[in-house]
Image (cartoon, rainbow, N blue to C red):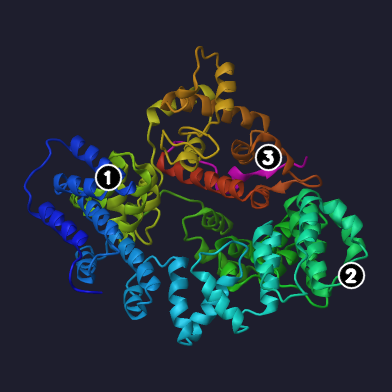
Amino acid sequence: MSSLYPPATIKFLMALALVIYSGTLPASLSQLDDQFLAARKAFQEGKAALVHEYAQRLQHHVLAPYIEYYQLRMYLRTADITTIEAFLTRYENHLLADRLRADWLKMLANNHQWQLFEHEFQKLIDKKTELLCLAYQYRIEKQDQTAIDSARALWFTANSMPDSCTPVFNTLISRNIITVNDRWARIRLALEAGQTGMARYINRRIPEGEALNVDELNAAAQNPLHYLKTRQNRIRTRADREIALFALLRLLTSDTNPALVKWHKFKDKLTASDQSYFLGRLGYRAAMRHDPRALNWFHDAHRTKDPYPMTDTLLAWQVRAALRAENWDGVLDGINRMSATEQADSTWQYWQARALKAKGKLTEANALLIPLSNQHHYYGQLAKEELGTVLGAPQKSIQVSEAEVTAMEKTPGIQRTLAFYRMNLRTEAYWEWVWTIRDFNDRQLLAAAEVARRHGHYDRAINTASKTIDLHDFRLRFPTPHREVLRHILQDQELDEAWVYGLIRQESRFLAEVRSSAGAMGLMQLMPDTAKWVSKQLGMANFQQNLITQIDTNLRLGTYYLKHVLTTLDNQPLLASAAYNAGPGRAKRWRDTERNLEGAIYAETIPFSETRDYVKKVLKNSVYYSNVLEQDRTPPTLKERLGIVAKK
């Protein structure tokens, strides 16, 4: 680039100088905030002159760096390298510097300025896939084997990838590094995920004469049962087999038995690897439906002459099917087949230990349980209880000093976050906060969490306090806002205060105005129809939907509904928690037809991943809240809260 500034950049720099040296300051914080919002809107609308005008007034605003970013971003195509580097230096380690560098890197790649790109790319912290693929474009041309291997790994996904990855993949395909088999593998991933558009796109890269017949694919997608009835004797090529497998999987998503009937008619026309592939998916779907045949299908998938590699997701459901059957050998087999990364997950560490213990291998079991028991999560607590220890009041709960909290509140990144919250720009506040605390030590994290708590941002307080490694403050991890209001309401409902707090923490992180994408509202995340029904049961006159987010109303409605589902589900907090998230009908349906289930196994085998995660966290939260609330009675353990779930 030339070192001479173009006219537009000169105007920008003059405006910047005015920002730096002007002494004007609007009269009030509210006015400053309004002007920042106006400047932000002007930036989004591409009104450069208006952004510059606001910049002169906002030089003393805590978010002034954002105005400077807006200005430079609007002139980035014509800005001099010196100007860009000055901004990056001035805001080194700032979120905005990383964002501007990412924007600049895209321009450098587009202009084929690869040496400068490489230099700046090394400094980038948030290396998104789009930018990774830009880097791979250059590095693959330089025969960088690490880049080649990393880029090839990106290929295996059902999802579409950024445009910057297309030339990378094209290069690897042209060199046969992404082979024809690799292309078929991605088509299979796409079809399994129902991404027929992606499958058709990859199909263009299959050699002519071997590719999928798109009309046949569309027919299988629209009516898989009809397709399978009419194509039974027409399976000759790999493309035919892929479409038949796709149709079988489509059928399997809605019901097991119709797919199974068709499978028996088609299986002899498929390769051993194809058979293994389908059997694994058959076991997976059956396990999610709690079908006792699932485990046999998983085993059949492993026993074929040419077993198809099974994903960790499928193997997780093999383990869950084994748990439902109390087949501890099956549990160990499934875990042992998982990747090393998945085996190290606390979920499978715990269940592996349980399986070993069930088989009398106590030494091996305890070798897993002891380190797990020191971790502050659901499986850590279960491990602790498995070893015969119950959770007591934390011995080393650390409270940071007032001086540390005051200093933290003055930190520029924290100040910017609070300003964004003040203007109800929650997304910007979230990213500024996450960036600011990313390298904090334990004491800094606790101080930041306390700042968030004092300002009522309980979600940030909880998430931040939960990041500590050695020093913990459990009152920040498990805060108790609105306690007087809740205790008064709970006197009528006779609900466990710790359980209710555990549920609210998971539902809303104590944000009264939060609304879910599904429309649930308030602290206890009530759906409008549920709230309306409860209001009638309570005899609330003149109930209106806008009352749902009021704290006392939301707690009254939510606790009544929670008591209702608890009463109708054997007074079991586990079942009621599942019902609160997924509905009472599903909570009942997930029970076993043949045997009573240990509560931890019921929870582990909930087919909805959101609900499965939800009930674990709600009940784990309840145990910790029992200690934070310092209840007089001896609180139930996590295993006692999970209980035994009676068969249907």
Evaluate if marks 2 and 1 touch, with contact meaning CB atoms under 8 Å apart.
no
N-terminal of the two: label 2 or label 1?
2
Between residue 507 and residue 518, name the one nearer to us. Answer: 518
Magenta stretch prevailing secondary structure: loop
Describe residue 489's horizontal placement relative to residue 226 as left or right: left
Describe residue 612's horizontal placement relative to residue 60 as left or right: right
Mark 3, other Cα within 10 Å: few <14 / some 14–19 / many ≥20 = many
Residue 417 visible in image: yes
Boundaries of the magenta span: 631-648
Where residue 426 appears, x then y in whole percent? Answer: 36, 44
Amino acid at circle 2: Lys
What element does badge 3 sit on?
helix
Between residue 342 and residue 632, name the one nearer to us. Answer: 342
The residue under label 2 is 269
The residue under label 3 is 587
The residue under label 1 is 418
- As for residue 157 lying within the magenta part, the answer is no
Amino acid at circle 3: Ala
